[in-house]
Image (cartoon, coloured by chain):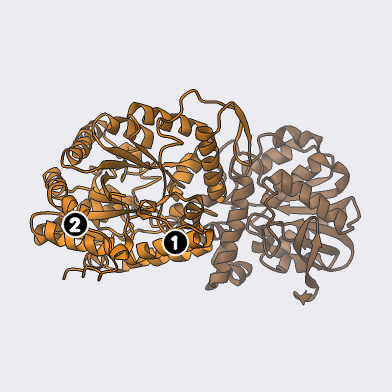
Amino acid sequence: MAALGSAGRETKVRCAGIEVQVRRGGAGTPLLFIHGEMGAPGWIDAFEHLSQSHDVIVPSLPGYGTSERPDWIMSVNDMAAWIAWFARDSEIVMPVDVVGCSMGGWIAAEIAVVAPEFINKLVLCSPMGIKPREGDIFDYFLESGATGLHRSFHDPEGCAQYMKYYGKELSPDDHDRIEQHREMTCRIAWKPYMHSLTLPAFLPSLNAPTMILCGEQDRIVPLDAARQYAQGIAGSELVTIKDCGHMPELEQPEQFAAAVREFLKR
Amino acid sequence: MQRQFFFFSEMGYNAYPDEEAEKYGYTALMFPNSIFDAATARDLWQMFLREHEYASEMGFDGSVCNEHHNNVLSMQESVNISAAVLSQRIKGSIALIGNPLPIHDNPVRVAEEIAMLDLISNGRIISGFVRGTGIEQLSTNANPAYNRERFEEAYQLIKKTWTVPGPFRWEGKHYHLRVVNPWQLPLQKPHPPIWAGGILSPETIQWAARERITYLVLGSALDATASCREIYHEVARQDGWTPGPEKLGYLIHTSVMDTDEEAYEMGKYHYGGTSAIGRNRGAGGQEFQKPPLGGALTQGTGSGGTTGGPHPEWAAPPGYISKRAKAGAMARERRMSEGDYDSAVRAGLILTGSPDTVIQKFKHIIDRTDPGYVTFWAREGKKPHEATMRGIELLGREVIPALREHTSALVTGKEVTPWPH
C-alpha cells in the first residue's frame, strides 16, 4: 500500500475477475470515480479535494493503469458490467454516488440505464457516448497521445496538473502507459467511435439525480453532446466551467470538486 | 528448388505536385484526393502494366502485386484486381503480397477471389497475406488493436475454406459465418502457395515459421533479412524441421543500368527513407522534413516503416504494433532516415550497379540468406519509363541467368562472395 498525498492510498486487489489497481482516500459517504480514456494519472488534486467530504474510490479500469487487461472486455458496455462487479466485490453499499469523466461518463450512463438501483447521484463530466449533432468528437487515433492530452486542456501550460502529469519530459515508461491507454480505448470504443447508437434512446429511463459538468472550451467533445445528455435526462442540470477544456478534474480541480460536492450535498 | 525471380512495382501515382506534398508533409491517408487526376492515372496504368509485361517477356518468372489504401505510392486498391489483370498480361506466376486480411469483414470473399484467380490463371497464383500497414487500418476502419487476432483468424478461416469440404459454419472471435460453402475452389491443391509478407515484426516471422509458410522480407537491409531467416529457422528447429529456400522471399529495391554510374543515379528514385516525396523526386537523400500534424507537441511513437510517407501516428495506430516490434521497426526507420542515399546503397537497402556489379551483390545476398524467391523492386516514383525498361531488360537478359546458376554458400559451405566496392 502506497501513500498518495494526505488522504489517498493505492492498493492492488484481486476482484471482479482481474488484478485491479485501486486508489482510495478520505472519509464519508463513498464516491465511485470512473476515469476516462486517458486513465487516472495519480491521486490528482480533485480527488484530494473530494476526499475532504467523501470516501473516494478510484479503480483503474481493466487495461488502464496497472490493472490487468483481460481479453473479455471488448466494449464500453463490458466496462459498465465490470464496474458493477467491482462495486459488489468491493462491498460498496448501493446506491452509491458516481462521477464519470469523459469515457468514464459514458460508462456511468450505461450503468445508470441498466441498473438504476446502483446509483444514488450521478455526475457526468465531459461525457463521451453521444454523437454531437454538429461537429465531431476529436479523433484521438489520428494523432499522438501527447497531442490528444494537450488538446484536452484549455491552457495546458498554465495548468499545474497538466504540467505535473503530462507537460513534463515524459519517460519511455510514461509513453508506454499513454500508448497502453490508447490501445485499451481502441479495443472498446473504436467503432462507432466514442459513442453509442442506442444510449440517446435510453436516456429518458435514467432516474438518478444527474449533473452534467463540462468545460466551456472543450476541444475534444463538442458541447452539444452534453446538451443532448441534459435534454435526455429528466431533471438533470448542465453546469459549465470557465477557462476549462475537456478535463475539468485536472484543469480546474477546485471548481470541479466544489461543483460535485455542492451537487452531492443537496 | 529452382530459385525464382519476380518483378515488382508499387504502381504508384507519381504525378502529384511536389509542392502539395510539401504543403501537407505526408502523402498518405489524408493527402487530399482533389489532387488526383483520372486521365493521368489511366495513362500510368498502361505504362505500369506494360512494364510488367516486358519483365515477363525478358524471362522473369513472375510478377508481384500488392495493395494499399489512401496512398499515392500505390494505385492498387485491390490486389486481386491487379492480379486478375496481370494474369492476362504475363506468362509466369502472379504473387500477391498480399491481401491485407484484417481489413476484411468477410475473409471468405478473399478465399473466393483467390480461387477465381487461380482458376482463371491456370494455377499461377501465389497467395500472400499481410496485416496491412497502419494506414490500411485507419482508411478501412479496421480496429488496429485486434489487427493480429483478425489476421490469424482470417488466415485459419481461408485455409479451412480451401481445404475442408463445405458447407460448414464459422463462429470465431472476429468472424462469424453461417454457411461457408463457396462454389469455386482453387486449382492448386490443397491450395495456392501462401506467403506472409512483413517488415520485420518478429511475431509474424515466428507465426509464419509455425505455419510453415514462406516469409517474404519486404525491402529490408541485408543484415536484418539475415536475422529474419535466423528467427524463422530457430522456430523450425524447435518444431523439428528444416526450412528450404522456398520458405524465404526477399523483396529488394534494385536499380540496374548499363553502367554503375547510371544505375546509381536511377537508384535515387528508390530512396526517400520513409518519405514518398524523396522517392518521387529521385532526391537521393534529401529527406523531406515532415511537420507534425498536431502541433509542436506531437510525439511520434515510431513508424512501421511503411511506404507512403505517413504521419508516424498513422503508421502505428494504437495496438497495431507490439513494443518489441516497435523497437525493431524504429531502429530500422532510424537507419533509413539518419543515413543518406549513399549509406542506403552501402547497407544493401537499394542495390545499384551494372549487371556485373549487381550480380556480385546478389551472389553475396544469396550466399548469406539463400532466398527461394527474389523479387526485384525495379520501378519506383518518377523513374523514367525508358530507364525502367532498360533495367528490366538487363535484369532479365543478364542478371537473372547468372543468378540461377549460383548455389548459396549456405549450401556449398564455400566462402561468401564478397560485396563489391
**Residue A95 on image: x %, y %:** 89, 50
- Disc 2 residue type? Gly
- Disc 1 residue type? His
Check the image and report above or below for A18 versus A110: below
**Residue B103 on image: x %, y %:** 49, 40
Nearer the observer: mark 2 or 1; the answer is: 1
Which residue is tagged 1?
A: B233
Q: Is residue A137 left or right of residue B10?
A: right
Q: Which chain is indicated by disc 1? A: B
Viewport quadrant of the N terminus of chain A:
bottom right
Q: Colour of chain B?
A: orange
Q: Measure how far apart labels 2 and 1 are at the Cα level.
A: 32 Å
Which residue appears farthest toward the left when viewing the image?
A: B258
Quarter location, residue B282: bottom left
Q: Is residue B221 left or right of residue B239?
A: left
Q: Which chain is indicated by disc 2? A: B
Q: Which chain is brown?
A: A
Q: Which mark is residue B267?
A: 2
